[in-house]
Image: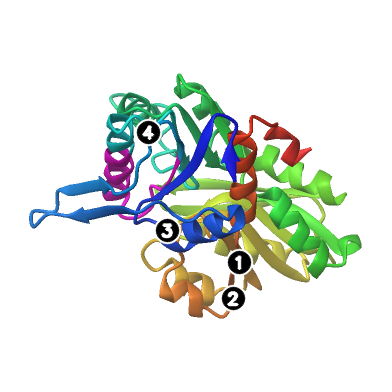
Amino acid sequence: MGAKNGAIKLVAGNSNRALSEAIGAYLAVPLCKAVVRRFADMEIFVEIQENVRGSDVFVLQSTSFPANDHLMELLIIIDALRRASARRITAVVPYFGYARQDRKPAARTPISAKLVANLITHAGADRVMTVDLHAGQIQGFFDIPTDNLYASPVMVRDIRERFDLAKVMVVSPDVGGVVRARGLAKRINAPLAIIDKRRERAGESEVMNVIGDVEGHTCILVDDIVDSGGTLVNAADALLEKGATEVYAYISHGVLSGGAVARITASRLKELVITDSIQPTEAVRVARNIRVLSIATLIGEAIGRTATEESVSSLFD
């Protein structure tokens, strides 16, 4: 595939090589030859081994664990491309790390999402593409065009294939995620319930109440990030106690840190479905109730439309 004003080049960092290769396969564009390695003291070295002068370059890199290493890889790759005279550089960041630090929750705390936006911009990116930002207003942290893609079309397709929609109820695991859950519920014409929870400290949550009648329904929890898994486990317990027949979860980004996989596996959650925006670990791949959906086609199509100056938003109409 060629761009409107130059050849498409795909450059992959080390965060999610499998997803990058799948995107390249969808676009029929091989990944650009590049070296992204470490010196002995763990400094990052990048060398682009193909001519990219005048090219429309897409850098594929999630800023997932280890977040700081993968962020620095992204910044250094962008700098290398800018100095190699790439015509346009798009940072494709399927999982945008630091997005949960999007405001000041207390005195003397940072807004790290804004800092990361500044770093990507000043490194030389001309455009950013990401998937299911934790907070939509992060798009405004960038002074360059930013496309926030949604995994919901991939999830909706999977839900339609696997469930009797007449028995499905979509559930938001907290009040803050209502807009996201309502959007998916509207797509499948399902009712909506909300979990009212109180978070006592970071990484822990206590479910307080279920808003909505879930009795006799197959409940599908919808959120953007699953980290410790505590919210999902508690929400599943609360829904089952209120008469739900089964509880599933569809989450865009499977951070799954610490003992999250074991927690999910031991829970009453029937199945957790995540995307491959973050490369699944071996523990995730073998877990009995965790399944991964690929968003390579979604990102690939968005890259193709960006390169040919076509509408990206129409993907989600």
Residue shown at the point (27%, 37%) measured from the top left? 80
Q: Nearer the viewer, mark 4 or mark 3?
A: 4
The amino acid marked with disc number 3 is: Asn
Read off the residue under disc 3: 16
- Is there CB contact under 8 Å for labels 2 and 1? yes
Q: Which residues are magenta?
A: 58-77
Task: Indicate the quadrant where residue 269 lies.
Answer: bottom right
Give the Cα separation between the discs numbered 4 and 2. Answer: 46 Å
Give the Cα separation between the discs numbered 2 and 3. Answer: 22 Å
Upstream in sequence: badge 4 or badge 3 = 3
Secondary structure at numbered mark 1: strand
Residue 146 falls inside the magenta stretch: no
Residue shown at the point (49%, 80%) measured from the top left? 286
Where does residue 12 sit, x and y in percent of width and height? 40, 51
Read off the residue under disc 1: 272
Residue 70 falls inside the magenta stretch: yes
Q: How is the image coloured?
A: rainbow
Read off the residue under disc 4: 53
Give the Cα separation between the discs numbered 4 and 3. Answer: 25 Å
Secondary structure at numbered mark 2: loop
The amino acid marked with disc number 1 is: Leu
Secondary structure at numbered mark 3: loop
Read off the residue under disc 2: 289
Where 174 sits versus 19, above or below?
above
Question: Is residue 153 in view?
Answer: yes
Upstream in sequence: badge 1 or badge 4 = 4
Q: Nearer the viewer, mark 1 or mark 4?
A: 4
Q: Quadrant of the C terminus?
A: top right
